[in-house]
């Protein structure tokens, strides 16, 4: 068995950036990890194991408070693929064990680790509840276009383009406020709190200046913005995030389709996978939408200790969460926006 030195720190250990670039996703970038911790006032722990002269594996976890008291340890809040990365299964298993020790030390109610694939480790309960959907750039733009559903995707993209939808690459604080307001409207319709506006105007705009986030906005001919989304740009895959729109305008102008095609073309040109994000089993219509874009379904492996549970694992279309969502969706918009202070508890 290899001998590793295991450390904990509040800052990225030496070699983390290189390891994240080689093996990780956007969510392993320390600029995202540190930024989320600052934005939501989370206590952050970088776990690392090293052999002489090399960082072998790493895992970032944050302490997410509960409204009922106590805390969860999560790898990582608002990041659906952020589990341990390492050069070997042995090193990754070491990180999982170190995280369990930290959870016990910090008296966390639950430890949640979110991965695509990871070794099954004793002391964890694995859930395969979630999937993601990925579009390959294989064959280039023409081949990717040919794989799109002709009726529900290709025709709608062309309709939106003929209607004069303009794709704007937003950069200013005003542009990011447009995105924040679109997201507030959509999230209230779903019955959940939206991120605070500073998440967009400060954190994501700052990451945009670093070149790892893009903002796409769809402007219709009368000057209004009909839709928007955020692109997280990792080393091997880009992640389609925070898609939001004005329903009536989207139906008329198909702005969401025009925007997503614009982002997909850029990903294909860069030779990276476009990840359309996490989907739960009850979100059948969302899964079908993603499949029509030529995406392939990929299972996610979420590991919990001591057992699966909590908000991440719960269905939101039945029971208490569905009732809360129904009430939230009927709140006045201004009241719902004040509820963004609750967003940090959802991480």
Image (cartoon, helix red, strand yellow):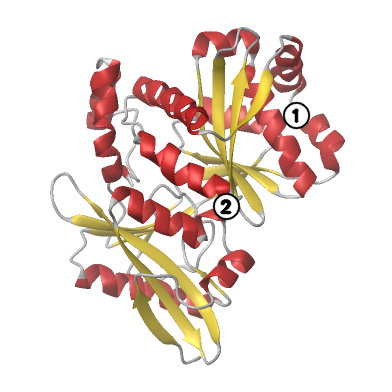
Circle count? 2
Q: Residue 317: x and y, percent?
A: 34, 28
Residue under label 1: 148
Q: Closest to the observer: 122 or 7?
A: 7
Mark 1 closeness class: few <14, some 14–19, many ≥20 residues within 10 Å = some
Q: Residue 44: x and y, percent?
A: 33, 63
Q: Nearer the viewer, mark 2 or mark 1?
A: 2
Against 58, residue 253 (above or below) is above
Q: Residue 237: x and y, percent?
A: 64, 51
Per the image, label 1 sits on a secondary structure element best described as loop
Asked if residue 75 lies left or right of residue 238, the reply is left
Marks 2 and 1 sit apart, C-alpha to C-alpha, by: 32 Å
Against 128, residue 59 (above or below) is below
Which residue is at a point 13% across and 50% down the rendered structure image? 69
Q: Residue 145: x and y, percent?
A: 80, 31
Q: Closest to the observer: 294 or 242?
A: 242
Which residue is at a point 76% across and 21% down the rendered structure image? 154
Q: Closest to the observer: 335 or 104?
A: 335
Pointer 2 or 1: first along the chain: 1
Can residue 114 be spotted in the picture?
no
Q: Quadrant of residue 196?
A: top left
Mark number for residue 220?
none
Which residue is at a point 43% across and 68% down the rendered structure image? 59
Mark number for residue 210?
2
Per the image, label 2 sits on a secondary structure element best described as loop
Circles 2 and 1, Cβ within 8 Å, touching? The answer is: no
Which residue is at a point 51% across and 51% down the rendered structure image? 300
Asked if residue 295 lies left or right of residue 245, the reply is right
Can residue 81 be spotted in the picture?
yes
Mark 2 closeness class: few <14, some 14–19, many ≥20 residues within 10 Å = few
Asked if residue 84 lies left or right of residue 250, the reply is left
């Amino acid at each position: 068995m290899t001998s590793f030195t295991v450390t904990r720190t509040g800052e990225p250990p030496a070699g983390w950036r290189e390891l994240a670039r080689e093996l990780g996703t956007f969510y392993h970038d320390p600029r995202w990890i540190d930024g989320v911790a600052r934005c939501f006032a989370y206590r952050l722990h970088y776990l690392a194991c090293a052999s002489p002269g090399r960082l072998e594996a790493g895992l970032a976890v944050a302490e997410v408070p509960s409204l009922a008291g106590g805390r969860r340890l999560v790898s990582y809040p608002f990041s659906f693929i952020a589990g341990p990365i390492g050069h070997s299964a042995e090193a990754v298993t070491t990180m999982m064990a170190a995280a369990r020790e930290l959870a016990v030390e910090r008296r966390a109610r639950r430890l949640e680790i979110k991965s695509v694939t990871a070794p099954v480790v004793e002391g964890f309960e694995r859930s395969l509840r979630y999937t993601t959907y990925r579009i390959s750039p294989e064959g280039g733009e023409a081949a990717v276009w040919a794989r799109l559903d002709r009726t529900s995707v290709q025709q709608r993209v062309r309709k939106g383009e003929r209607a004069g939808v303009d794709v704007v690459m937003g950069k200013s604080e005003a542009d990011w406020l447009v995105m924040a307001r679109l997201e507030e409207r959509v999230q209230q319709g779903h019955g959940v709190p939206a991120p605070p506006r500073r998440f967009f105007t400060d954190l994501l705009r700052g990451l945009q200046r670093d070149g790892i986030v893009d903002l796409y906005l769809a402007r219709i001919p009368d000057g209004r913005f009909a839709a928007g989304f955020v692109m997280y740009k990792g080393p091997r895959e880009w992640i389609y995030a925070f898609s939001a729109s004005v329903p009536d305008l989207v139906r008329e102008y198909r702005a969401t389709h025009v925007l997503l095609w614009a982002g997909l073309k850029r990903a294909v040109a860069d030779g990276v996978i476009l990840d359309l994000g996490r989907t739960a089993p009850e979100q059948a219509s969302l899964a079908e939408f993603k499949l029509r874009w030529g995406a392939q379904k990929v299972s996610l492996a979420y590991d919990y200790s001591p057992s699966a549970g909590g908000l991440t694992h719960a269905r939101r279309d039945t029971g208490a969460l569905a009732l809360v969502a129904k009430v939230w969706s009927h709140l006045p918009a201004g009241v719902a926006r004040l509820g963004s202070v609750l967003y940090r508890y959802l991480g």
